[in-house]
Image (spheres, helix red, strand yellow):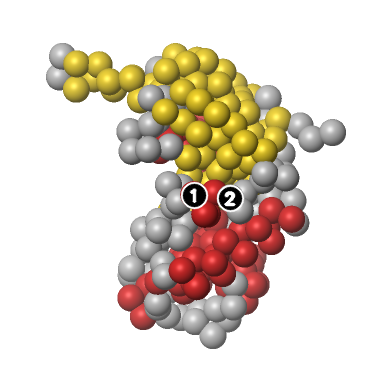
Amino acid sequence: MKKSIIKLVKVWKTYKMGDVEVHALRGLDLEVMQGEFLAIQGPSGSGKSTAMNLVGCLDIPTKGTIFLDTHDISKLTESNLAQIRGRKIGFIFQQFNLINTLTSMENVMLPMMFQGFSEEKRRKRAIELLELVSLGDRLDHKPKELSGGQQQRVAIARALAVDPDVILADEPTGNLDSKTGDSVMDFLNKLNKEGKTIVMVTHDDELAQKAGRIVYLKDGQVITKEDRK
């Protein structure tokens, strides 16, 4: 029986804009099971990016509880949150978020440095991961010397660097042509079949259909759920 890896219970996220309070999430309940591929959809302003930030330990809720592997992370300090997300969660962003002054290999090595890996281990794993995403011949290339698809594959390799339990993908094909986007999705599905938990935020209906389960958000709440498999 699969266990829960992330659970949001009655989570609110409120931002103050001057004298006005904006409720990005309104009592959100969401559970992610270990090994599943979950897509989160919703219109602009639905709260999906805020939900992603909370799931990814990038932020804490105004109210409510968030469990990661049964540990309540909703009241942790920023430094403790950073430690947890560094070990447990890998991120893939629409904008790639690579460091332009670093090579492909150095970008992939970076998360491992923060987790105390030796230089030898960092280098060895970075080479293995870049070969896994078919970039073994681009180890010393900087982001501006790579195509969009190649940059996204470097970002995927970086997300896998510390062998995290969960991969969070925020519009992972948003800046790619359809063929390259398909190859990125194929790779995410492959990772999922190998046991990785994938949570993807997307506005793209066709992309969401490739996930095992879809959760639709509106006004900071889940309005429907759809099991694909």
Q: Name the kind of residue labelled 2 in the image.
A: Gln
Q: In the image, is 227 to the left or to the right of 149?
A: right
Residue 182, relative to residue 18: is it above or below?
Answer: below
Asked if marks 1 and 2 touch (Cβ < 8 Å), the reply is yes
Q: Position of residue 8 (x, y in %)?
A: 56, 24
**Secondary element at image label 2:** loop
Residue shown at the point (71%, 30%) measured from the top left: 4
Residue 200, relative to residue 27: is it above or below?
Answer: below
Q: Is residue 2 visible?
A: yes
Q: Is residue 167 visible?
A: no
Residue shown at the point (46%, 69%) measured from the top left: 178
Q: Name the kind of residue labelled 1 in the image.
A: Asp
Residue highlighted by disc 1: 205
Q: Which quadrant is home to the C terminus?
A: top right
Q: How far apart, in angstroms, are the residues tagged by discs 1 and 2? A: 6 Å
Q: Which quadrant is home to the N terminus?
A: top right
Residues packed near mark 2 inside 10 Å, few (<14), some (14 to 19) or many (20 plus): some
Of 148 and 158, the residue lying toward us: 148
Residue shown at the point (45%, 60%) measured from the top left: 173
Using the rendered view, name the quadrant where residue 174 is placed. Answer: bottom left
Of 114 and 178, the residue lying toward us: 178
Residue highlighted by disc 2: 209
Q: Position of residue 139 (x, y in %)?
A: 51, 79
Seen as rendered, the residue at the extreme right is 1
Residue 111, relative to residue 80: is it above or below?
Answer: below
